């Protein structure tokens, strides 16, 4: 295929940091392979078009005012977006299709799996839809089994958190993505819709690599309803970094502070862009870190502690006790931090981008999952890949202190480090010519070329 003649692709990211990053990275990968790229986006959390002069951007109305959205819980924002964007998306896509010419044929749309309504719009406009699922395959399998798992394990009021989920080892009942907010049923429906509409798509892309999730990829493909071709073409960020898609300002003092630290000595702590906790949990975190006696770089995102501007909730005694060995920022250049020689461990919430970025830099983890896919990802880090420690009691200072020391000081941590380094090597190799992700990308490009004919 003459790369210059490749068709136009229309991409539609879900507007959250952990979804925008991989979609824009995918856009860059596809653009570098010769496709023209159009991005449909909401006003809420929109990416800055000036960072991507080669892409065409189309703004759609999302019906959210900035002031209103900033006060809403994230699940409520998702629900509103899933309702408000239906018509604007279809109209925008129709308009893009009506303005195509022979040089700019639109081959297909690539939308985030959570945008469930986009399949109906694509069907109506007779254009194939390829889905990007921005999380792990293992968690997608758990999401697709969620109605069954809820019925078997969560209907009893006193369900046993530590019990095994027999259908999906090594997942435990406490790892099932539960939604315990008052509008939980809405979100369960959104997940069911996501899975149902993904089954109708023409292809399914994962930001993972075969060597990491081979049994899970095989399991998914064995499921009759997932008949579409599946492409494990990650890790995306190893081809194109996430930096320009950051919604927050990255504090460069993270790097200068790390420069003055001994190799492998620092624990990097960050819970991504959405997770939040109350004051009591912040205190447990702080004292767990203090009691571990290890140097740490901690991202305290404004909003991480519910109801506080930034650090007001942290006790002064903690700040004083850790002044010489702790550095706190609002947002860090995470990939650069993880690749810094001073970083020896990552305490994460188990978001998929963070997990993958840590694996790709050979950094072992402590996982404190909050919701959604994070519980399954963390279980895999602990039980399957054995490259980290999942905090089993939530946020409790004694367990935190012990986990930090297990990871950073003890032999067990060194063994995890060796295992994650092996995975890092596999991640590097899979992108090279002939590697698994390289081949899967090749197959995806062929499918996309066919859609553009
Ligand atoms: N991130 C960052 N700086 C930070 C914290 C996070 O650049 O201080 C980036 C991180 O590299 C990752 C994304 O934000 O790409 C978070 O995605 P993830 O899936 O881990 O978590 P989410 O934010 O979706 O919960």
Image: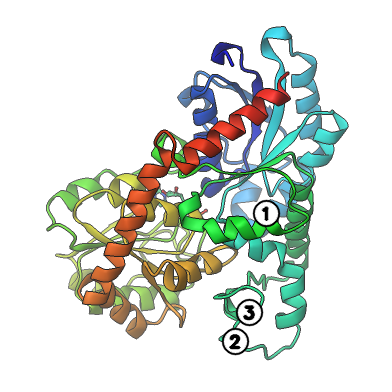
> Are the residues flagged by discs 3 and 1 in contact, CB closer than 8 Å?
no
User: Regarding mark 2 in the picture, which secondary structure is present there?
Assistant: loop
Q: Name the image quarter holding the C terminus.
A: top right
Q: Is residue 80 above or below residue 187?
A: above
Q: Position of residue 85 (x, y in %)?
A: 76, 40
Decide which of 297, 381 is in the foreground and name it. 381
Q: Position of residue 247 (x, y in %)?
A: 47, 42
**Furthest-front residue in this view:** 434
Q: Is residue 142 left or right of residue 271?
A: right
Q: How is the image coloured?
A: rainbow
Decide which of 230, 332 is in the foreground and name it. 230
Q: Which label sits on residue 163?
A: 2
Q: N-terminal of the two: label 1 or label 2?
A: 2
Whole-angstrom CA distance, mark 1 to mark 2, is 27 Å
Q: Residue at x 56, y 12 (%)?
A: 4
Q: N-terminal of the two: label 3 or label 1?
A: 3
Picture quarter containing residue 3?
Answer: top right
> Are the residues flagged by discs 2 and 3 in contact, CB closer than 8 Å?
yes
Q: Is residue 237 above or below residue 357?
A: above
- The residue labelled by disc 1 is 221
User: Regarding mark 3 in the picture, which secondary structure is present there?
Assistant: loop
Q: Residue at x 54, y 75 (%)?
A: 170
Picture quarter containing residue 23?
Answer: top right
Q: Is residue 317 left or right of residue 116?
A: left
> Are the residues flagged by discs 1 and 2 in contact, CB closer than 8 Å?
no
- The residue labelled by disc 3 is 165
Give the mark toward the camera: 1 or 2: 1
Q: Residue at x 13, y 56 (%)?
A: 261
Q: Position of residue 445 (x, y in %)?
A: 59, 29
Q: Name the image quarter holding the N terminus.
A: top right
């Amino acid at each position: 295929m003459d790369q210059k003649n490749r068709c136009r692709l229309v991409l539609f990211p879900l507007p959250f940091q952990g979804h925008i990053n991989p979609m824009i990275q995918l856009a860059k990968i596809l653009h570098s392979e010769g496709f023209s790229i159009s991005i449909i986006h909401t006003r809420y959390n929109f990416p800055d078009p000036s960072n991507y002069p080669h892409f065409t951007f189309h703004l759609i109305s999302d019906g959210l005012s900035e002031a209103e959205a900033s006060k809403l819980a994230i699940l409520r924002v998702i629900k509103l977006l899933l309702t408000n964007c239906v018509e604007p998306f279809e109209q925008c896509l129709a308009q893009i299709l009506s303005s195509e010419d022979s040089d700019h044929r639109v081959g297909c749309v690539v939308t985030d799996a959570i945008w469930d309504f986009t399949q109906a719009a694509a069907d109506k406009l007779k254009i194939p839809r390829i889905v990007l699922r921005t999380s792990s395959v293992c968690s997608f399998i758990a999401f697709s089994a969620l109605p069954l798992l809820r019925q078997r394990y969560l209907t009893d009021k006193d369900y046993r958190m530590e019990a095994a989920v027999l259908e999906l080892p090594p997942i435990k009942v406490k790892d099932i993505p539960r939604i315990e907010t008052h509008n939980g049923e809405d979100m369960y429906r959104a997940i069911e819709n996501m899975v149902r509409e993904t089954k109708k798509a023409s292809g399914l892309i994962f930001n993972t690599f075969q060597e990491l999730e081979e049994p899970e990829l095989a399991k998914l493909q064995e499921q009759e309803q997932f008949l579409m071709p599946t492409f494990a073409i990650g890790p995306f960020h190893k081809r194109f970094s996430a930096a320009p898609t950051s919604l927050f300002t990255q504090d460069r003092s993270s790097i200068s502070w790390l420069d003055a630290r001994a190799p492998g000595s620092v624990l990097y702590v960050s819970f991504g862009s959405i997770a939040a906790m109350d004051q009591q949990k912040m205190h447990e975190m702080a004292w767990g870190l203090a009691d571990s006696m290890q140097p740490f770089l901690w991202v305290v995102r404004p909003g991480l502690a519910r109801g506080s501007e930034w650090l007001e909730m942290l006790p002064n005694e903690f700040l004083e006790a850790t002044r010489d060995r702790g550095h706190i920022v609002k947002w860090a250049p995470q990939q650069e931090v993880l690749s810094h020689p001073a970083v020896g461990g990552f305490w994460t919430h188990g978001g998929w981008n963070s997990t993958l970025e840590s694996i790709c830099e050979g950094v072992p983890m402590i996982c404190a999952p909050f919701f959604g896919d994070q519980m399954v990802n963390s279980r895999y880090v602990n039980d399957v890949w054995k490259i980290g420690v999942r905090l089993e009691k939530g946020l409790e200072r004694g367990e935190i202190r012990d986990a930090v020391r297990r990871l950073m000081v003890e032999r067990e941590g060194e063994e995890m480090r060796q295992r994650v380094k092996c995975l890092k090597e596999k991640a590097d190799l899979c992108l090279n010519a002939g590697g698994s992700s390289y081949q899967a990308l090749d197959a995806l490009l062929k499918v996309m070329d066919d859609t553009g004919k």
